[in-house]
């Protein structure tokens, strides 16, 4: 299933995209929201599937309807740095022996087509297309990558926007360059795990002002999805509604020759993960 949330910011309602890829169906009479509570409830998800198959869900008029982030009440966002072989190479860094972890605050999340704000004083705002993993089952001290995959409820396209000067040159952790307002567009859909048979076989692409900048595949990940979930579960409890951003392939501005083409107000970024939907954001000054 392709689940999403539509409506004005802060007042989104749950919806479903039909198999035809164009018709929106209203889920608000069946479930309260697309969130961790729903994803952990197999009976509720099956009711949604049955209603989708029966074709009884009300149709929503998509004209002028905002598409919000596809997941509500996100618990935490765990991010993996330097998780693609080609991205580590382009930035001149060694392949990490273990996953590099950092956090994004849930309030950085916006919809796939919402405006992204270039922070005041920023000169190194960068793009990063990523596969996002949405947790649907509590994960603690998992023993295998297979157990990790079993805890995944679904997947989404994620844009891990970053301010590189603040991330790298200002001391401390990476978090200063990762948690600016609007720095994590998510969606447009949450695609349930049954529709993604192999998360290590997905194309990952991003364009800036129509020019292809990133063109990779999740097969290039150093640590695959199942292993990332297993690894993270050794250090913290993952709960339904948590998100993991699994890293970005080569092609970011930081990895390009001088003058590096960092983002500015007026730029347009488009990105997609194969099968998970396409995003588009216009950048404006904060």
Image: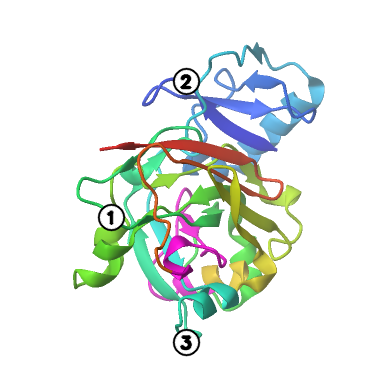
Q: x%, y% of residue 211?
A: 59, 49
Contact? badges 1 and 2 (CB < 8 Å)? no
Bounds of the magenta segment:
230-257
Q: x%, y% of residue 202?
A: 71, 58
Q: Earlier in the sequence, mark 1 or mark 3?
A: 3
Which residue position holds label 2?
A: 7
**Residue 249 shown in magenta:** yes
Q: Compare residues 28 and 170 and report the one nearer the observer.
A: 170
Q: Compare residues 284 and 176 and report the one nearer the observer.
A: 284
Alpha carbon distance from label 1 to label 3 = 26 Å
Q: Secondary structure at mark 2?
A: loop
> What main secondary structure does the magenta stretch of the protein show?
loop
Q: Earlier in the sequence, mark 2 or mark 3?
A: 2
Which residue position holds label 1?
A: 123
Q: Is residue 183 left or right of residue 14?
A: left
Q: Is residue 60 above or below residue 129?
A: above
Q: x%, y% of residue 237?
A: 41, 64
Q: x%, y% of residue 160?
A: 44, 54
User: Which-is-in-front pick, marks 2 and 3?
Assistant: 3
Which residue position holds label 3?
A: 94
Residue 104 found in image quarter: bottom left
């Amino acid at each position: 299933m392709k689940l999403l949330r539509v409506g004005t910011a802060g007042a989104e309602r749950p919806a479903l995209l039909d198999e035809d890829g164009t018709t929106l169906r209203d889920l608000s009479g069946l479930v309260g929201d697309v969130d961790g509570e729903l994803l952990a409830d197999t009976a509720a998800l099956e009711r949604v599937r049955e209603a989708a198959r029966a074709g009884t869900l009300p149709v929503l008029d998509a004209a002028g309807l905002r598409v919000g982030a596809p997941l509500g009440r996100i618990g935490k966002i765990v991010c993996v740095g330097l998780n693609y072989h080609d991205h580590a190479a382009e930035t001149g860094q060694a392949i990490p022996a273990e996953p590099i972890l950092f956090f994004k605050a849930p309030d950085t999340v916006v919809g796939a087509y919402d405006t992204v704000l270039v922070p005041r004083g920023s000169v190194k705002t960068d793009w990063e297309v990523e596969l996002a993993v949405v947790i649907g089952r509590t994960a603690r001290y998992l023993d295998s990558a297979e157990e990790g995959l079993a805890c995944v409820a679904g997947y989404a396209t994620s844009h891990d926007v970053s301010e590189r000067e603040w991330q790298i040159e200002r001391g401390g952790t990476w978090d200063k360059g990762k948690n600016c307002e609007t720095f994590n567009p998510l969606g447009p859909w949450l695609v349930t795990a049954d529709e993604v048979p192999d998360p290590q076989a997905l194309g990952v692409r991003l364009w800036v002002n129509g020019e292809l900048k990133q063109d990779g595949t999740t097969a290039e990940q150093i640590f695959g999805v199942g292993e990332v979930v297993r690894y993270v579960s050794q250090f913290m409890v993952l709960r339904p509604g948590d998100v993991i951003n699994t890293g970005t392939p080569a092609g970011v501005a930081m990895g390009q020759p001088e003058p590096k083409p960092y983002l500015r107000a007026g730029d347009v970024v488009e990105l997609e993960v194969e099968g998970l939907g396409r995003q588009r954001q216009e950048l404006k000054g904060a």
